[in-house]
Every structure is written in C-alpha cells, then in structure tokens.
Image (cartoon, rainbow, N blue to C red):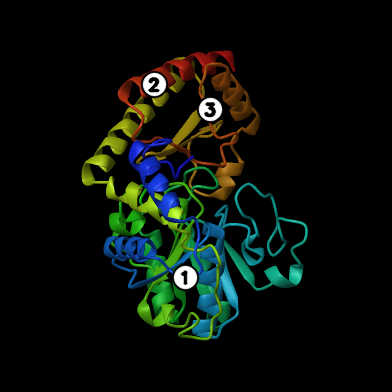
Amino acid sequence: WGPMILGHAHPDVVRAIQEAAARGTAYGAPTAGEVELARRIVATFPSIEKVRLVSSGTEATMTAIRLARGFTGRPRILKFAGCYHGHVDALLVRAGSGATTHGTPDSEGVPEGVVSLTRVAEFNHADQVEAYFRAEGREIAAVIVEPIAGNMGVVAPRPGFLQRLRELTSAAGVLLIFDEVITGFRVARGGVQELTGIRADLTCLGKIVGGGLPVGAVGGRADVLDRLSPSGGVYQAGTLSGNPIAVAAGIATIDRLSAESYETLERLGARLEEGLRRALRDRGVRGAINRQGSMWTLFFGVDEVRDYAGARASDVGAFGRFFHAMLERGFYLPPAQFEAAFLSLAHADDDVDAFVRAASDALSAA
C-alpha cells in the first residue's frame, strides 16, 4: 500500500486527522490547510508553479488530459502500454495487466470512439514515440507516462528515455505529463523529477499527498494551469477536493519526510534486493528483481523486464504460488507481479531479514 510511506496509523498523522475532524469534516470553500498543502507541493516540485487539488489520482490524470487538450487545441493523447493512469475512459487502453490490442478498451462500458484518440507506444521505446510524432504530431496534445512504471510491476526508464520524451514533446509543442501518483514523494521527495532533473509540463500526484486518504493533485506550468476554470475555459470541479481531513493527513506525512527518510528507504530496499537475489540463486530459481528505492517487483521465469511485453512474458503461475506461500508465512504481497510492492519507514532491518528468510523457504515450497 504505497501511500503509507510512514506506515499505517502513524501517531502524527492520526493526531492531525483528529484535530482536523474536530474543526469540521467538509466545507463548501477552500481552507487554510488546502493552501498549505499546495505550498508544500509547489516548493517540492520545481516544475509545478500552480496546483489544483482533486479527490483522487484518477481525477488528477483526467484533469491533466482535459487541460492538455484545452491548452493545445489538439485531440490525441499518447500513452504507454502497461502504464495505468486511473479509470479514465480515454486511458483504459493496455493499462496495467490488461491484455489488449491497439485502440481497444480494457473495460466494458468504454466506447471505442473514446479510445480512438488514444495512441499507445511501448515503454522504453522512444523510437515508437518518434514514429507517432512524424505521422500525427500536430494532432497530439500530450504524452502521459509513469516515469518509473509501477503498474506492470516496477520497470525503470532506460537511460535517456525520459530525456528523449522531453526533447520530442518540447519540439512538437506537445505537453509532457508525468503521472507521479506512485513515485511522487515515494522514490524521492520530489519524485522522479528530482532524481532526473527532467521537468514535466504537468504532474499528477495521488494519495501519498493525503497520507493515504482520498486526494489527488495536478500541477505544472502556470500558463497551462491558468486555463482551468474559473480563470480559464477548461472546466474542473470537485465538491470534496481538498478535503480538510485529507490535507491535514498529507501535511503531517510530508513534513516528516526528510533526506534521511529516503536514505533509510534506499538502504532497506537494497537489503531486500540483495537478500532476494541470494535466495533465488541459492534455490536455483530463475527470476528478475526490479527495484527503485523502496519500490520493487519479483518476476519469475525471466532474466530482465524492461517493458510491458517483458512483464507479460514472466511466469504468472509461479508468482501466484509464491504469493500464497508467502501469505502462509505471514507476508502479504501484491497479488500479481503487475503491481509494485513497497517498503515503508515503519519497516526495519529485522523485518526485511525475516521476509528474505520466508521468501527463501517459499521459493523451495513453490
């Protein structure tokens, strides 16, 4: 449960929720807490000059897509296979573990006419993006990407991939949207943009900025955000957006995250990765471990996973057996290798070591 970077029911977060609830659970207008959370987000992400709080990561990506179309006057969106951006109709194409073909929706109830404006490239394959830009560049409003994929399992960008996206979009007048719902405040305080120095035009954030409570945010260039109503013609609204309890939990969470926090998470992640690699080697099990900081995934039956096709080529049945074997040993993993697993600041070396011992045992049993 990635948003719980401090662990569940952290005392500071619980206290902030209680104090906020005592003042009132919802209002019909913005609150001081909403402004304070927005200030923290803007101070953390250099690419975010203005921010609009919404009620979920899905609402953040939905708003970003509508905003990109309104700002550019273009209809098409380019996304990447295996990247999930919430249950937005236009983005439910080859999202996460859905085994679909180009232009076909992953869900019933999504008309093909809606996704006909969505183009799909393979993650880490910039040449496919270049091909789309040559053919339809003047029709593309935005490229949206998880800068570190977390919904086909954890898959990192190849060196130069994100920079190439930035170059292509800038040259074509296309907005670059980083969906950092998972990675924002997770892989670093400023997300992937802090790690790489690459600035997106729009950034989507999710539950971690609400301490795990329902909240989301879309932020970015001031000239783009100014197109949102009421200052501009792109409509967006949310009765419960910026809810005072959620923003209080988010402020309490963000204020506890320091450079030392991320050093701890990296150390724990490296300890887990090393232990799992040793367990695989000792048990003679073929597998690939993908890790970025405190995010990780174990893929069975493959040597590496760099894109959605590689993730789908992994052994689903082996992961299922491993999942149940670990559950029997007291460790609850994501139920599929198409989702990221997370460490939190509530974990310690002993927890990681116990996990590795259980995994070694589970590998022999599975």
Is 140 drawn above or below residue 308 in the view shown? below
Residue under the point 64% across and 56% down: 94
Q: Is residue 180 visible?
A: no
Distance between mark 3 and mark 2 Cα atoms: 21 Å
Amino acid tagged 2: Arg
- The answer to whether marks 3 and 2 mark residues whose Cβ atoms lie closer than 8 Å is no
Distance between mark 2 and mark 1 Cα atoms: 55 Å
Q: Earlier in the sequence, mark 3 or mark 2?
A: 2
Give left or right: position of 283 versus 317: left
Pick whichever, 59 or 238, lies toward us. 238
Q: Earlier in the sequence, mark 1 or mark 3?
A: 1
Pick whichever, 67 or 6, lies toward us. 6
Tell me the SS state at disc 2: helix
Quickly name the residue at label 3.
332
Amino acid tagged 3: Tyr
Give left or right: position of 121 versus 114: left
Residue 295, quarter of the rendered image? top left
Tell me the SS state at disc 3: loop
Residue under the point 35% across and 55% down: 192
Residue 29 — which label?
1
Residue 190 x/y as whole percent: 31, 56
Q: Earlier in the sequence, mark 2 or mark 1?
A: 1
The mark lying in front, picked from 2 and 1, is: 1
Quadrant of the image containing the C terminus: top right
Amino acid tagged 1: Ala
Quickly name the residue at label 2.
278
Is disc 3 surrounded by few (<14), some (14 to 19) or many (20+) residues within 10 Å?
few
Residue 220 x/y as whole percent: 38, 71
